[in-house]
Amino acid sequence: MKQLKKSLPHVCPSCQSPLKVTSLSCDACETVVSGSFELPLLARLSGEELQFVLDFVKSSGSLKVMAQQLGLSYPTVRNLLDDLIQKIETNERILKPDK
Amino acid sequence: MTTWLFNPFTYIAGLKSLVIGWIIILATACIAYYSHTHFDGAIDAHLQLSNKVYPAWHYVAEPFIDWSCLVLVFFIMGKVFSASAIRFIDIAGTFAFARWPFAFLALINFLGPHIKDLTRISPLDLLLIFISLGFCIWMIALMYNAFKVSANIRGQKSVWLFIISLIAAEVISKIILYYTLH
C-alpha cells in the first residue's frame, strides 16, 4: 500500500485562522501533554520552504552556493529568499498583531 | 522547454549570461553586416534599402549602444522600484542574452523583404514581415522576463515599469545613435 505523506496544517480549514497545538503525546509511554502552544514560525512554512531554509543554512547563507546546488540562477534564488522573508514577516504580523 | 525559450533566466543570469549575450550580440552584428540589417534603436531592426556603405564598426556599435541604453534604464528602474538587492551584472547579463532572437531576424533579412512600394507587397514579403514581428515579440517577452527575474518586480507594477522603461530606452538609444553614428 502506498504510504500517505501527511503535511502539518497551519490554518483552520473553516475560518483560515492560524492553528495552535493543543496536544502532544509520547509514543513510548503514551503520556499526553495538553495545553495551548503556538506553532514556531518555521513550522508554519511549507515543506518546500522549510527545505529551502535548511539548504540556506547548510550552505552557510551563500546564495551563490545554493544557486549552484539547485541548478538555478542567482537572482532566482534571491527572489525565492525574498518571497520567504515576506511570508515570515506576514506570519509574524498575523501572530503578533499588537506589535 | 517553454521556460528555456521564454525565461532562461531562471537558470542562467549574471556573468555567464553576459558572456553568452555578448557573443550573441557580436555574432548578430556579423550577420547584420552581411544582410545589411541595422539595429537603430533599443528594439528596432531595419533592413537597409539604400546603397550607402556603412563601416563594419557601425554594425557592432549599434546593438551594443542599444543594449547599454536598455541596461542603464532598467537598472535605474530596478534600483528605484525593487525592494530586493538587485545586481547590475544580472540586468546586464540577462538583457544581453535576451537579444538572441535578433540573430534570427538578421538572418531572415538575407531573404528580403525589399518593399519599396506599399501597393506591391508580395506574399513572401508579408510572410517575412510576420516572422520578423514574431522574433521581435519573442525578444520583448525575453526582456520582460529578464527584468522580472533580475529586479524581482512582479504583477501590474512590473508591466507598467517595463513599458515605460522600454520606451525610455528606445528614445535614449535613438538619440545616442543619431549623435554618434550619423
Image: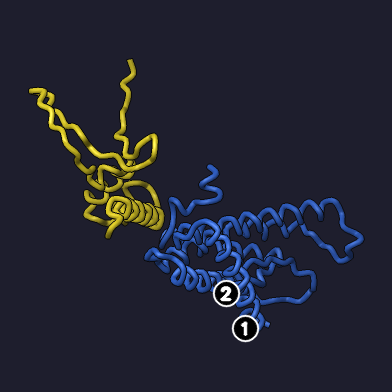
Chain colours: A yellow, B blue
Q: Residue furthest right?
A: B119
A73 displayed left or right of A51: right
Mark 1, chain letter?
B
Q: Residues within 10 Å of mark 1 (few under 14, many from 20)?
A: few
- Identify the residue at horizontal 36%, vertical 55% (top origin): A86
The image quadrant of residue B159 is: bottom right
Amino acid type at mark 2 = Ile
> Which secondary structure, mark 1?
helix
Determine whether B67 is above or below B8 in the image: below
Q: Residue furthest bottom?
A: B179
Left or right of residue A23, residue B77 in this image: right
In three-dimensional space, the C-alpha distance between marks 2 and 1, rounded to whole angstroms, equals 10 Å
Residue furthest to the top: A1
Residue A81 visible in the picture: no
Against A14, residue A57 (above or below) is below
Identity, as a three-letter code, of the amino acid under mark 1? Thr
Q: Report x, y in % for residue A37.
A: 19, 41
Residue B57 percent coordinates (x, y): 60, 75
Q: Nearer the viewer, residue B56 or B81?
A: B81
**Secondary element at tag 2:** helix
Closer to us: A69 or A28: A28
Q: Which mark is residue B180?
A: 1
Q: Quadrant of the N terminus of chain A?
A: top left
Q: Is residue B20 left or right of residue B169?
A: left
User: Is any part of residue B41 visible from this angle?
Assistant: yes
- Which residue carries the number 2 mark? B65
Q: Are marks 2 and 1 in contact (CB under 8 Å)?
A: yes
The mark that comes first in sequence, 2 or 1, is 2
